[in-house]
Image (cartoon, rainbow, N blue to C red):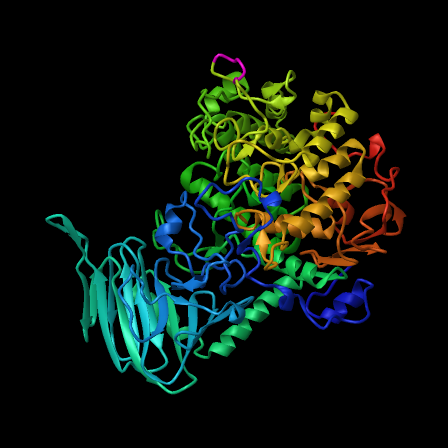
Amino acid sequence: MICDVRWPFAILLACGLAGSVAAKSPVDYANPLVGTASLDDPKLLGNAPPPGEEAYTGFTFPGPTLPHRDCILGPINKDLTEAAGNHGIIFPYVHSRRTMIGFSAPMPGLTIMPVVGDWNVPPDRSYASPYDKASEKASPGYYSVFFPDSGVRTELTTTERTGYYRFTFPQTDRATVLIDLGAGDNNIEILDDHTIRGHSQGRGRSFVAEFSKPFARFGTFHQNPPRLDGSRVHRDDAIWADARNSSGSYAGTYVNFSTTAGESVVVRITTGHSYEAAQQQLEDEPKKFDIVRETARQAWSEKLNLIEVTGGTEHQRELFYSTLYNSLLTPRLITKQGAPLHGRNADGRVAEYDRYSPIAFWDTGRNQIVLLTLLEPDVKTNILRTHLEMARESGWMHTSFYGDHAVFMYLGDWERGLPFDYASVYEYLRKNAMDPAGPRGDLAEYLQRGWVHEDFQEHPSPPNADGHAGVDKTLEYSWDDYALAQFAKKLGKVDDYQMFLARAHNYTNVFDATTGFMRGRQEDGSWISPYDPFEPYYNYMSKEASGWQNFWLVPHDVQGLINLLGGRDKFTAKLDTFFNTPYHPKGIARDVTGMVGLYCQGNQPDQQVPYYYDYAGQPWKTQAIVRKVLALMYGSDKFGLAYPGMDDQGSTSSWYVFGAMGFYTVDPSSPDYIIGSPIFDQVTLHLGNGKCLVIEAKHNSEKNLYIQSATLNGQPWNKPWFSHADIANGGKFIFQMGPKPNLAWGSARDDAPPSMSR
């Protein structure tokens, strides 16, 4: 089935979907504010956050950017020094906050803010202003907000490297725009009556800002370090009228204008590794704000049109395209093909291909990496090349947190037929898994014992962030090793295949049959005691999870878990308990939030578990749980914007995209997709090879959530899963939906998805 993604009607016609076209297009549904709010139902939040902290939002950015680009503008309503102190998590915007500090710029640390009247130097920021929440609008490539106190309307848009700000002032002689570079060793300079430039020594970046209207007046400021005078602390903040240069912490400039009512001042800011590079970039950019805004909209429209949905509610369509939008923000293009390379070993070379920022393998390595392969195979190929080049430069394959999940990406893409020189990757994947000097923590112990120990410690609330996370490492390394075994097998490396396959069973070394959970071991091999699987941990035994959540972290061998528990009935009984037991621990873990029973949607360790009923002969329960998670965990707050926890560069968003379409990648290194319950009447997914996968759910509704029967390309389909080979050349699933479970569909033992164990 071939789809032409250039013409919407042609797409519908080619896929057999011709008919009335919705008045709103995908780009009209996407709202970048989605993900900036937190859940507000205490039952869903669990007992997080700790006292005095805000509940986690998705930590998404509502300001304009382009797909996979690193020029991100946005509103700042949370002081970055405060955000940085919050456990190292920097999120400059939370939807519930009502006072704006300023707007970010293409260069990190640079803040720009329009004011009318009095102001004070940063970081005091007496110019911080309440903003009208009803006026706040965000769409792909655009953001706007109104400040009623000053009467200023602010609009943002962007190209790949240049930020555009349009400030519409009232009639006043005191219109001011402030630019400050934040803390650090910075300098800033006013060149003429419409141009400012600056440099951040710590960031190694320069910027140039150009104003559409000449300054009437100007000056500079900076913050001197505090000094002690007797018993009093003094801070000599300096402001110099008519000065053109300033250096130091919070170095900045102010420029004044006289404006008529409704007069706009457009500011363009771009960055580079030198002033000359930034200035040249600025000269190459368009000057018209509205042209840039429309270009950004079109860029997003092209991406979001890759998946078309009909049916569902208006809110579900908004959530779907907003989560798809967030899924396509990362990884970010850092060097375009043909552009000069910078940094270590650059040697004047230029990039031979588009190079991207690293994948967050512990997060997006569980789902987004597959979504990118389905939708953007050309982008994904360059991501594969980037990571291989990084490995060649550093000697190690990139990884993150406690897994070593790059192998999921490479093996998964190989299994899905994406062309690449996979043999060239293996030496780095193998080295990560064999050399204790590499990025796998505690690897020497894992190689010797087949598990990683934990040092006993008291369990405070919130939990300590130290510890080996021994259970988590053992589980995730076992998963990695299974993928490496399959990789070695495809290369014909029999000895490696057998070695890694044996290691893939190491997860059983931390299974305690007396409790029925994965349990930490002390260095002498004894079980950690006391042990309470209901209590959340941070890095002690588990990584940001309780024992109940971490038990299921064996995606490569769900059948093996079934066997450990004594069969399907005991396995599904444990799943039932997991999803239906209220979460009331004594301790607080800020990451363990977004609860359905003991299940945590707000973090990665157990996000695949709703699909485990498919492995145990009860797929109707997967269908019900997935629908419940989609409805409760996304946009169920009073604003309709909430996420259950951090988006983690698109991971939480990608979960929604897959779940809403009706399937998920329980093990991304596998070519298999596990079926849930599609929430739309029709989904058309335009694969990167020009073919399309159509998923049609007949009689679909909020109540009709259970699959009664299914066909693929007109043939009966009785399995609760399918493989990439089944849809690689396109295809059409038709699901008949109903209000009651069909206990016969997908429940036979032979219909279960593949696992390592039989």
Judge whether 661 appears above or below 555 on screen: below
Q: Is residue 92 magenta?
A: no
Looking at the figure, which quarter contains the C terminus? top right
Judge whether 562 appears above or below 315 on screen: above
* Residue 341 at x, y percent in the picture: 39, 55
Q: Magenta segment, which residues?
A: 524-529
Q: How many marks?
A: 0
Magenta span: chief secondary structure: loop
Q: Is residue 526 magenta?
A: yes
| Residue farthest along the left direction in this orientation | 230
Q: Nearer the viewer, residue 276 or 640?
A: 640
Looking at the figure, which quarter contains the N terminus? bottom right
Q: Is residue 652 left or right of residue 145?
A: right
* Residue 310 at x, y percent in the picture: 76, 62
Residue lying at 25% horizontally and 80% vertically, measured from the top left: 217
Q: Nearer the viewer, residue 612 or 338?
A: 612
Q: Is residue 459 left or right of residue 13?
A: left
Q: Is residue 484 visible?
A: no
